[in-house]
C-alpha cells in the first residue's frame, strides 16, 4: 500500500518537489545557468534521470511488459529488437497449435544449431540490438514477441509513466539515492539504497503474485521410499 504522500506523487513536477522536500533543499531544483556551453538541468532533474537508468537495470514487473510482432524472412536469422527493449519475456510461432520458442544464450544457440540449415525456428537468443533465431527460418512465420520495455522517461512534456503511476516510492528513493552521491553525503547512500531495494522487492512480489494468481498448482505424485 502507498502512503498518502506517495500517492500524491503522480507527476514529474510533484516528484521534483517531493525530492526537494525530502532533502530539505529547494536550491537543488534550479538549473545551472553558468555553464559556458548552455544550461544544465538542476540536480533534482539529473538525479531522476540517473534513477531511470537504475530502474532499467533492476526492475522487471508486469507493467513494463509490452509486445510486438516479428515476421520472419526465409534465410534470415537476425531481426532488429525494438528500441525500448530491455529483456525478452516470450516469443512463439503463431499457428495452431502455437510453438513457443526457447530462450537461450548466444553460445548455446550456436552449439545446438551450428549449421545454417533452414527450418522452422525453435530457439532464440539476444545479441546486442538483435534477436537471433535457430534454425534459420525457412519461410515467413508470424512471431508475437513479448518483452520488458524501458519506461518512457519523465520530462517537462511527459509528466508521468507506468512506473511513477504504480510505484512512486521507487522514483523517490532512487532519485534521493542518486542525489546523495552528488551531495557527497556518503553516510546516507546505504539508507536510500535500502529504501530503494525494498520498494523494488515489494513491487516485484506484487507483480509476480498478479501473474500467478490464477495458475493452478499441480499436486506432486506420491512417492514410496523403499528402505
Image (cartoon, rainbow, N blue to C red):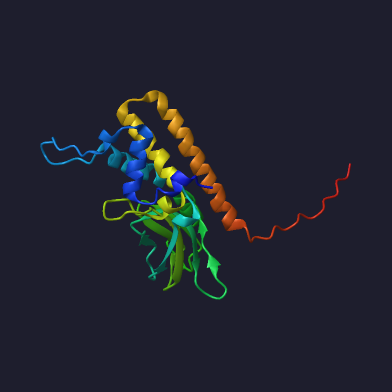
Most extreme residue toward the front, as rendered?
4
Most extreme residue toward the left, as rendered?
36
- Is residue 190 left or right of 209 when viewed as pictured? left
Residue drawn 53% across the image and 42% down it: 201
Residue 154 appearing in the image: yes
Corner quadrant of residue 179: top left
- Is residue 197 left or right of 9 when viewed as pictured? right
Q: Quadrant of the C terminus?
A: top right
**Whether residue 20 is situated above or below residue 65 in the rendered picture:** above
Q: Position of residue 199 (x, y in %)?
A: 49, 42
**Whether residue 6 is situated above or below residue 119 in the rendered picture:** above
Q: Position of residue 185 (x, y in %)?
A: 36, 25
Residue drawn 56% across the image and 48% down it: 205
Most extreme residue toward the bottom, as rendered?
96
Closest to the observer: 27 or 108?
27
Closest to the observer: 138 or 99?
99
How many numbered tags mark residues here? 0
Residue drawn 47% across the image and 68% down it: 119
Q: Position of residue 213 (x, y in %)?
A: 62, 58
Residue 58 appearing in the image: no
Residue drawn 13% across the image and 41% down it: 38
- Is residue 164 left or right of 95 when viewed as pictured? left
Closest to the observer: 114 or 46?
46
Amino acid at each position: 500500500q502507498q502512503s498518502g504522500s506517495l500517492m500524491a506523487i503522480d507527476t514529474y513536477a510533484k516528484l521534483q518537489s517531493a525530492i526537494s522536500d525530502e532533502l530539505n533543499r529547494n536550491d537543488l531544483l534550479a538549473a545551472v545557468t553558468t555553464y559556458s556551453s548552455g544550461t544544465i538541468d538542476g540536480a533534482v532533474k539529473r538525479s531522476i534521470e540517473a534513477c531511470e537508468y537504475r530502474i532499467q537495470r533492476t526492475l522487471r514487473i508486469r507493467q513494463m511488459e509490452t509486445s510486438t510482432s516479428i515476421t520472419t524472412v526465409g534465410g534470415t536469422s537476425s531481426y532488429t529488437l525494438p528500441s525500448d527493449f530491455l529483456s525478452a519475456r516470450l516469443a512463439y510461432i503463431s499457428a495452431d497449435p502455437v510453438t513457443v520458442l526457447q530462450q537461450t544464450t548466444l553460445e548455446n544457440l550456436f552449439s545446438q544449431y551450428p549449421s545454417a540449415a533452414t527450418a522452422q525456428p525453435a530457439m532464440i537468443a539476444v545479441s546486442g540490438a538483435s534477436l537471433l533465431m535457430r534454425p534459420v527460418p525457412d519461410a515467413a512465420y508470424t512471431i508475437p514477441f513479448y518483452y520488458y520495455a524501458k519506461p518512457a522517461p519523465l520530462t517537462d512534456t511527459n509528466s508521468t509513466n507506468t512506473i511513477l503511476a504504480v510505484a512512486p516510492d521507487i522514483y523517490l528513493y532512487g532519485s534521493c539515492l542518486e542525489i546523495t552521491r552528488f551531495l557527497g553525503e556518503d553516510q546516507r547512500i546505504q539508507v536510500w539504497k535500502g529504501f530503494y531495494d525494498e520498494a523494488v522487492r515489494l513491487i516485484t512480489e506484487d507483480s509476480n503474485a498478479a501473474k500467478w494468481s490464477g495458475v493452478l498448482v499441480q499436486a506432486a505424485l506420491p512417492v514410496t521410499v523403499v528402505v
